[in-house]
Amino acid sequence: MALKLFLFALLLCLPTSLSSTASKGKEKKSKFNPYRYTFIDKASTFSSSSSSSFSSNGQDSSYDYIVIGGGTAGCPLAATLSQNFSVLVLERGGVPFTNANVSFLRNFHIGLADTSASSASQAFVSTDGVYNARARVLGGGSCINAGFYSRADAAFVKRAGWDPKLVKESYPWVEREIVHQPKLTLWQKALRDSLLEVGVRPFNGFTYDHVSGTKIGGTIFDRFGRRHTAAELLAYANPQKLRVLIYATVQKIVFDTSGTRPRVTGVIFKDENGNQHQALLSNRKGSEVILSSGAIGSPQMLMLSGIGPKKELQRLKIPVVLENEHVGKGMADNPMNTILVPSKAPIEQSLIQTVGITKMGVYVEASTGFGQSPESIHTHYGIMSNKNELFSTIPEKQRRPEATQAYITRNKYQLHEAFNGSFILEKLAYPISRGHLSLVNTNVDDNPSVTFNYFKHPIDLQRCVEAIRLVSKVVTSKRFLNYTQCDKQNVHKMLSLSVKANINLRPKQLNDTKSMAQFCKDTVVTIWHYHGGCLVGKVVSPDRKVLGVDRLRVIDGSTFDESPGTNPQATMMMMGRYMGVKILRKRLGNKAGV
């Protein structure tokens, strides 16, 4: 479990102090604004009178765009659209700016260990028995990941059908505001040198670009260890046309079904007090609701709103607006496996800085040094407790009472051991195995049931075996041993240590540590790069419009059939900017001004 939470923290990321460039004059009038921007407020402040000033015509409380989810793609998208139109963002979580667990690199693991309802991360367990998380905060996954920033490769951009010129303009728009060059730690230097020693060449230096070999990527942590998230991209917004409501949980999208095609008219959401509100979409041509709730939230919201597999909707008595068997299908998660590496050298905190991009379609990264006293890591319940929402999608028969109690007993101390460890990570770039998502109930606050089918396809398993062999060479290389100051160990002994760590709920074959294929199955974890559920050509068109209905788009990772680059957050933020510009240019032409 220790390793689980460390890895858990490993990909999502913690926020930082935002250097706002918008509305600075107004901000100075207030001694302290916990929301940082004047256009952010709690959902309970929503009313027709308070929202009329943001409306498209100044006479009603409608909006040109309603964005569901102020996450990694939603924030840059909303900031861009607000240059010309009124925009309402509905974010179910709070703000990252005053959350120390989000803002500081040193607290990276603690935010993910918090399973309370107010946490910036919402934990879940896939039916595969793998612990996972989804963001619940303004800024989305950029607030709980490991901060690594690296662009997608040119082939991905081509497959996506994107305009390369606009893509190249959109990445720097993000980077100018929140991305930094890391100061390499000794651990990351050791990984760099070891990758080159075992043949992951050439060395490409510091670059945002996705190129084969070994490189140093960007980070959203600055030199003081503070995180900068997608929420800071709201600094680009027009504050007169943007309104962001936090603790605003959308319950359903509202349709007018009286015509030949369902037409979106608005959304229903609840505020932090549980009161319901309806936000209306403007009647102006081009106005849209845009789902940006991530690969878990977007297919879930479509189904809760009546778009999805007919039998699934009827089972839960959800009125069918549009039957589409593909909603929630094609889910994938990039499987990750880790090797716990002993070290006699002083351990320093280090998140991902160095990456090896291999020609076999495997990425090698590393992290270390998140030691913490057991007493300082607090969760409301043991992460395997049946009181915890983590278990909401796991069949009762799979929750062994003796395993649960044993875990609760040693929970704190496992965390302490794992966070003091050092890890080499390998991730499969293009998994062939596919899964699905389905609703458990009609409560939007509850996680849906998710299956990723890790290593179901034999090619995925074979690639993992090759990756473990590569990582084994790295950790026993001369350069790496010089750093760890340890004797060259038997690889199977290190694999055995990793298998015995309580990192998932999958059954273990403790007597078969010499089988690398079994090691892959036993120790698989997530790096939170899951995607799919609203795929292009099946649920949405290439311009992300939902097929079969009017005035509804999905712009987030649920539309991807592969995860871009080594780590997707750079491309998610770029996509928010890119799609915003495309929408404005389509609607306004040269008058868009972007």
Image (tube, rainbow, N blue to C red):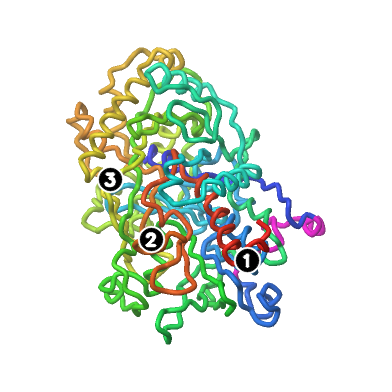
Q: Residues within 10 Å of mark 2 (few under 14, many from 20)?
A: many
Judging from the image, what secondary structure is the residue with disc 2 in? loop
* Residue 30 sits inside the magenta stretch: yes
**Percent from the top left, x then y, of residue 470?**
32, 25
Marks 1 and 2 sit apart, C-alpha to C-alpha, by 27 Å
Position above or below: 249 against 368: below
Judging from the image, what secondary structure is the residue with disc 1 in? helix
What residue span does the magenta drawing correspond to? 25-43
Which residue is denoted by mark 2 in the rendering? 534
Mark with earlier residue (1, 3)? 3
Amino acid type at circle 2 is Cys
Looking at the image, which is closer to me, 507 or 307? Answer: 307
Position above or below: 520 against 145: above
Which residue is denoted by mark 3 in the rendering? 432
Q: Does any portion of residue 459 appear in the rendered image?
A: yes
> In the image, what residue occupies the spot 33% across and 54% down?
331
Q: Residues within 10 Å of mark 3 (few under 14, many from 20)?
A: some
Which of the numbered marks, if any, corresponds to residue 588? 1
Marks 1 and 3 sit apart, C-alpha to C-alpha, by 40 Å
The label nearer to you, 1 versus 3, is 1
Mark with earlier residue (2, 3)? 3
Q: Residues within 10 Å of mark 1 (few under 14, many from 20)?
A: few
> In the image, what residue occupies the spot 43% across and 61% down?
297
Quadrant of the image containing the C terminus: bottom right
Mark with earlier residue (1, 2)? 2
* Residue 463 sits inside the magenta stretch: no
Amino acid type at circle 1 is Leu
